[in-house]
Image: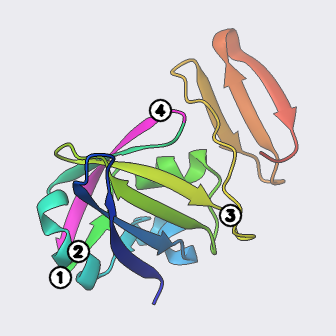
């Protein structure tokens, strides 16, 4: 099984749900609608926290809103998922740890690479866009169409 759940207590002793999910290739492909499945056990256990959409926040405060799709007991991260996955250069074998923040639909998202090391989180800006070239390089487009090409993230 590639996801697990537990509860994490806040500083005041309130228990917030948390779980992790392994990223699989199928969730990263546009032709498969690029959705990440949260399996039925976790979805049922935390259904009160998973409604029509969720907001993920990384440790830098970057936020991502995603629509959810319920199907056969599982819930799928749908619209917004591929942008999130591309922004963080997710690939099969990465893990995402979700911890509910205590508000209606917000989860803290911490991402670990295939070597089980937490990634360095880039800052998201409406003036900056990151995309991957066909050669695996990343292109950053910054204000006024200034572009910088570099290897890796």
Q: Secondary structure at mark 3?
A: loop
Please state the extent of the stretch shown in magenta in the rendering. Answer: 60-71
- Which residue is under mark 3? 113
Of mark 2 and mark 3, the one earlier in the sequence is: 2
Cα–Cα gap, marks 2 and 4: 25 Å
Of mark 4 and mark 3, the one earlier in the sequence is: 4
Q: Is residue 32 above or below residue 2?
A: above
Q: Is residue 121 visible?
A: yes
Q: Quadrant of residue 87?
A: top right
Please identify the quadrant where the N terminus is shown: bottom left
- Which residue is under mark 4? 61
Cα–Cα gap, marks 2 and 3: 24 Å
Q: Quadrant of residue 121?
A: top right
Q: Give coordinates of residue 101: x percent, y percent.
A: 30, 46
Q: Secondary structure at mark 2?
A: helix
Q: Foreground mark, 3 or 1?
A: 3
Q: Quadrant of residue 43?
A: bottom left
Q: Are marks 1 and 2 in contact (CB under 8 Å)?
A: yes
Could you tell me which residue is drawn at 71 percent across and 70 percent down?
114
Q: Is residue 69 magenta?
A: yes
Q: Are marks 3 and 1 in contact (CB under 8 Å)?
A: no
Q: Residue furthest top?
A: 144
Q: Give coordinates of residue 153: x percent, y percent.
A: 77, 45
Magenta part mainly helix, strand or loop?
strand
Q: Foreground mark, 1 or 2?
A: 2
Q: Is residue 138 above or below residue 36?
A: above
Indicate which disc residue 126 carries.
none
Q: Is residue 29 visible?
A: no
Residue toward you, 24 or 60 = 60
- Which residue is under mark 2? 43
């Amino acid at each position: 099984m590639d996801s697990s759940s537990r509860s994490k207590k806040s500083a005041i002793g309130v228990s917030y749900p948390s779980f992790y999910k392994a990223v699989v290739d199928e969730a990263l492909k546009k032709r498969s609608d690029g959705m990440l499945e949260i399996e039925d056990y976790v979805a049922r256990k935390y259904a009160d926290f998973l409604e029509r959409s969720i907001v993920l926040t990384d440790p830098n405060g970057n936020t991502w809103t995603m629509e959810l799709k319920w199907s056969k007991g599982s819930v799928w991260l749908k619209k917004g998922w591929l942008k999130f996955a591309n922004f963080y250069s997710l690939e099969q074998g990465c893990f995402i740890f979700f911890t509910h923040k205590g508000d209606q639909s917000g989860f803290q998202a911490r991402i670990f690479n295939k070597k089980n090391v937490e990634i360095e989180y880039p800052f998201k800006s409406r003036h900056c866009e990151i995309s991957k070239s066909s050669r695996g390089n990343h292109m950053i487009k910054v204000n006024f169409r200034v572009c910088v090409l570099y290897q890796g993230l």
